[in-house]
């Protein structure tokens, strides 16, 4: 399985004396996955996406995108920033024309136009006259029209209505399935991620704390309720409940009697890890940096 992004010991400080935003951040994102990038506000998700997009340089460590330094692969990457920057004075048609000019040889005009049309947007409408969600649609058309191999999206769903979100995420899924596009998108909307993503990177303390296929990560945990001894297990979170306690644990081995065991939902898995920033990290083998590596350039 080829690699879309590989980070090895990546660190980032803004300014010489700034606090470390990323610290020894290591992971591998296999190609073709639709991965959620999750974590609390200010943890460094945008910073990591900008480094992968080649717009910001890490302070230490190595990061490769599609096998090369991010700046060298820019033609194959589309990045959609949080603020969805577009030229307000341009019309939608002009914006898409700009996309064609900036991406010679790659631009899929019919596809970009289709994404815009599905939002009932007229090509003559000026970008400045669009709502936040409509702007997102145009920005996504610009990103997808490039037919990127890697799509980096910073909170793409925040201002979309539920129908538009569903439709555009469906487009992303179909695109990834048909063309093998790798998608890495930051989001706080966990319910939507469960339907869209098959891979997860959870950030905390400047690094990846949970990384892997969502099914594998869920399968590595149990939600247990009852009374008894959990001292032999890795307990991510434990809370008192009416029937003793409820805990999210790693499946380190068989549990004794007295525990009711359930598979956690993605929501339960994420919330438990977000509430327990000191829980030991878990990065599955396919997401471990270096494990599948053949060559890394600086
Ligand atoms: N240009 C900058 N100069 C100095 N500090 C910055 C700069 N950009 C980001 N930071 C700091 O880096 C940290 C990480 O910011 P970043 O935007 O990457 O977080 P995030 O996880 O994307 O947050 P959110 O979920 O709120 O969007 C924050 O503490 C932020 O204040």
Image (spheres, rainbow, N blue to C red):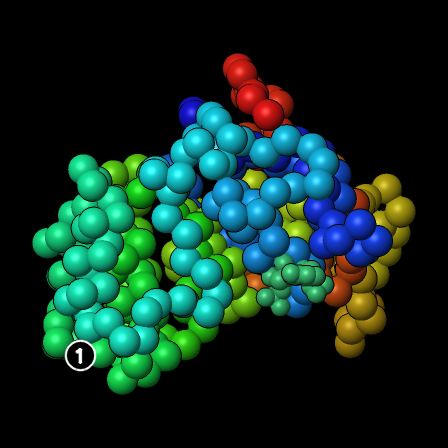
For the residue pair 203 and 256, the one nearer the viewer reads as 203
In the displayed structure, 86 sits above or below 25; it is below
Tell me the crowding category of disc 1: few under 14, some 14 to 19, or many 20 or more residues within 10 angstroms, Cα based. some
Q: Which residue lies under the disc numbered 1?
A: 125
Name the spot of residue 251 as percent of width and height, x first: 70, 42
Name the spot of residue 29 as percent of width and height, x first: 51, 37
Q: Locate residue 180: give its quadrant.
A: top left
Q: Residue at x 84, y 53 (%)?
A: 17
Local secondary structure at mark 1? loop
Q: Tell me if residue 83 can be seen.
A: yes
Q: Residue at x 80, y 56 (%)?
A: 18
Ligand 1 image position (quadrant):
bottom right
In the displayed structure, 184 sits above or below 241; it is above
Name the spot of residue 200 as percent of width and height, x first: 54, 48
Name the spot of residue 40 as percent of width and height, x first: 67, 64
Please tell me how many numbered marks the rendered image carries: 1
For the residue pair 67 and 59, the one nearer the viewer reads as 59
In the displayed structure, 272 sits above or below 54; it is below
């Amino acid at each position: 399985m080829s690699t879309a992004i590989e980070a090895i010991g990546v660190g980032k400080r803004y300014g010489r004396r700034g606090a470390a935003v990323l610290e020894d951040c290591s992971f591998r994102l296999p190609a073709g996955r639709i991965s959620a990038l999750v974590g609390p506000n200010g943890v460094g998700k945008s910073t990591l996406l900008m480094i992968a997009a080649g717009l910001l340089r890490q302070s230490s460590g190595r990061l490769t995108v599609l096998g090369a330094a991010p700046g060298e692969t820019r033609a194959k990457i589309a990045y959609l920033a949080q603020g969805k920057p577009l030229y307000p004075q341009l019309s939608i048609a002009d914006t898409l024309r700009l996309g064609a000019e900036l991406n010679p040889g790659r631009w899929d005009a019919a596809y970009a136009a289709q994404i815009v049309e599905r939002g009932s947007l007229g090509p003559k409408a000026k970008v400045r006259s669009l709502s936040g969600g409509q702007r997102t649609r145009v920005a996504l058309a610009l990103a997808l029209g490039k037919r990127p191999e890697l799509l980096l999206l910073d909170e793409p769903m925040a201002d979309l209505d539920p129908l538009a979100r569903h439709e555009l995420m469906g487009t992303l899924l179909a695109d990834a399935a048909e063309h093998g596009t790798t998608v890495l998108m930051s989001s706080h909307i966990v319910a939507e991620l469960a339907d869209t993503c098959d891979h997860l990177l959870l950030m905390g303390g400047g690094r990846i704390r949970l990384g892997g296929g969502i099914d594998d990560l869920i399968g590595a945990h149990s939600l247990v309720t009852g009374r008894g001894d959990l001292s032999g297990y890795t307990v991510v979170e434990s809370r008192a409940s009416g029937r003793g306690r409820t805990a999210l644990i790693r499946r380190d081995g068989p549990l004794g009697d007295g525990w009711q065991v359930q598979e956690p939902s993605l929501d339960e898995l994420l919330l438990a890890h977000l509430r327990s920033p000191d829980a030991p990290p878990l990065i599955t083998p396919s997401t471990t940096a270096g494990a599948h590596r053949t060559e890394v350039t600086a």
